[in-house]
Image (spheres, rainbow, N blue to C red):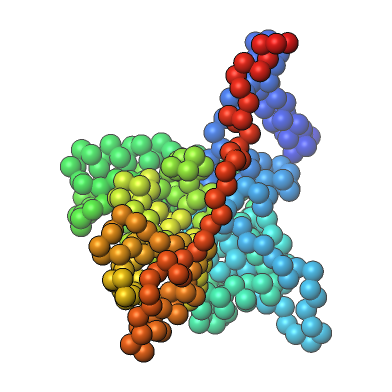
Amino acid sequence: MENEAGTPDQLEENQSQEENAMDQDLFGFKSAIQPENPFLSRGCCQPPRLYHKNETVFQHRCSKFDSFDWMKDIPVAEGSPVYDVVEVRFKNCRKDYYRMPPDMELSVGDFVAVEASPGHDIGIVIMTGEMVRFQQRKKTLQTSPEEFKKVYRKARLTDIEKWIAAVELETSTLYRSRVIAEQLGLQMKINDVEYQGDNTKSIFYYTADDRVDFRELIKLLAEEFKVRIEMRQIGARQEASRLGGIGSCGRELCCSTWMSDFKSVTTGAARVQQLSLNPQKLAGQCGKLKCCLNYEYETYIDAMKDIPNPEIRLKTKRGEAVHQKTDIFRKQMWYSYLSDMNNMLAIPVENVILILEENKKGNLPEKLEDYCHITEKKSEFESGAGQDDLTRFDHL
């Protein structure tokens, strides 16, 4: 005899009908405002459902922390054991490696229950096979497979149900924890909350300029939410990647769309690229130097290998000349005489090197004009705008 709720297939059908009904407005059209998806930060395009296989829940286009397995079509050599370590991701940038049991087969997108302290956590498999070994080698991880934490099992129905209930508490917990921290007068900002899959532990991510004594805060949070509390401090760049935003370029922040790790950015990168050292232009949303300053840094370093030291003056019979600016990719350097600083001369790099070699030998060239880059002067206006008279259509 069936219960009142019905079979799992009927429950799934009823759930889909309720979702479709919620999407209909008064005029019968689908609403443009969709409910917030708390699992989006975990790489899920929609919250997982209880009574189907969730094939379309996890997709590669939904998360910036997915890894492309370019070895998936390469078969393992005969006699070689299959690498039994998988990479599992959790919320935002947190992911780790876990060891599978010998009798378990996992594929990308599977929900798994993994070892945690205490209890277990629910994550999503994002990489399997030999690619995991190469990924660990790239990250210089010296841990042997036996030392990794274990994958307990594929997530059961009860595991997913408890996981969904825990994740839905994160938003309200974040707002409430901010109120408690403000009441205690703590100089800190709680940016994100992550519940463990079994709802026994919660990680609070915060930023602070100085050292914060949050012992009293942990007591109040434990009494309020009845879970184990762990505090983790993150930097300004990690905060910006979690919050997101629009950069000065007009595009979405790189750290919140595709960047998975952060490298230190120094003012030397701006100097090499001959950028103005203006803090307002060089700083990003996080208040730190923009990560994009490193994008072309190595290209500029390679291009500057053949460019001589700009601090060395060029000596001629007409007088000494000092460096003004350099076009790195056109291989041109501008110099001006000390007696005529307003007149800059564009000299190719190979000619600058030739003049410096002559100066080392004690020879002084006649003048820099003999080594300048000659540009053809074009008499006609190249642009199509402005060539015709505004009254050209009056006779029509």
Above or below 156: residue 103? below
Residue 93 image point, x, y percent: 49, 56
- Nearer the observer, 230 or 130: 130
The residue lying furthest to the bottom in this view is 361
**Going 39% across and 40% down the picture, which residue do you hit?**
173
In the image, what residue occupies the spot 78% across and 37% down?
A: 9
Is residue 132 positioned above or below 178 on the image? below
Would residue 166 be seen by someone viewing this image from the given angle?
no
Q: In which quarter of the image is residue 150?
A: bottom right
In the rendered image, the vertical position of residue 11 relative to residue 304, given as above or below: above
For image coordinates 40% across by 53% down, the residue present is 290
The quadrant of the picture occupied by the C terminus is top right
Q: Which of 194 and 14 is in front in this view?
A: 194
Total marks in image: 0
Tell me the residue at 73%/48% (across/down).
55
Q: Position of residue 351 (x, y in %)?
A: 47, 74
Question: Can you give x and y, in whole percent of width and height, for residue 124 in the image?
Answer: 61, 56
Q: Is residue 273 left or right of 92 when viewed as pictured?
A: left
Q: Where is 313 relative to 195, above or below?
A: below
Residue 106 lies left or right of residue 333; in this view the side is right
Q: In which quarter of the image is the N terminus?
A: top right
Q: Is residue 335 visible?
A: yes
Residue 20 horizontal side relative to residue 307, left or right: right
Q: Where is residue 112 in the image (x, y as percent from the top left)?
A: 62, 58
User: Residue 97 appears in which quarter of the rendering?
Assistant: bottom right
